[in-house]
Amino acid sequence: NTGPSLNNSIVDLKDFSFLLNKEAFNGNLHLSNLKDNVEVIGRLKGLLNLSDLNDFYPMEANTKISGIIKPDLSFLFSKSAITNKQYDQIDCSGLLSFVNIEYQTKGRPDIFIKSGVLKLSPKQFDLNNIVLQFGQSDMAIQGVLNEPLNFITKAQKVSGHLNASSKLVSMKE
């Protein structure tokens, strides 16, 4: 930081890499202009076995998480490019897949996501083959989120459509 303003601050994680239970996770992240027009450049690739989180992150009593998340993502954007829909100045691409995600905690229905893939692009995120169970309820989901990077800007909306099917939806949960 070259002064008291967050706009002068830079966060730069160059080519980080770690092993979590022999599984590699690599990436880089560069953040600048943190106050007025945050700029983000990065890449994430690897495999996260969520059950490994139980070993080093304090979970609430009777809480369990497991499953595999595989990101292969790259991104380059600024808040102003998103706000002004300047998609030629935005890179947000890759896949985020997940398999056998299970979350259990006391007092809530168990959540199990058998599979799913998120395909990212600046204009939309495609949700493919998401198969999940929430307590007794099951669901299969396909769909699209339009302009998903608007989550970063509070003034804009995210739209989309989902196609969902289910054999059972329990209204008791």
Image (cartoon, helix red, strand yellow):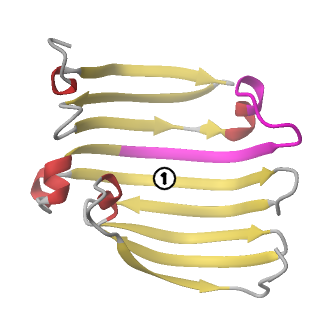
Please state the horizontal and vertical placement of residue 80, each as a whole percent of the image: 14, 50
| Magenta residue span | 54-73
Q: Residue at x 45, y 28 (%)?
A: 26
Residue 68: x and y in percent read: 65, 46
Vertically, is 141 above or below 34? below
Question: Which quarter of the image is occupied by the C terminus?
Answer: bottom right
Residue 151 horizontal side relative to residue 64, left or right: left
Q: Position of residue 49 (x, y in %)?
A: 67, 38
Name the spot of residue 166 as percent of width and height, x first. Answer: 71, 85
Q: For numbered disc 1, what is the local secondary structure?
A: strand
Is 140 inside the magenta-drawn segment? no
At x 30%, y 35%, the residue is: 42
Which residue in the structure is indicated by mark 1?
96
Q: Where 47 falls versus 7 (above or below)?
A: below
Q: In the shown orientation, is residue 43 left or right of residue 86?
A: right
Q: Is residue 65 magenta?
A: yes
Quarter residue 156 falls in: bottom left
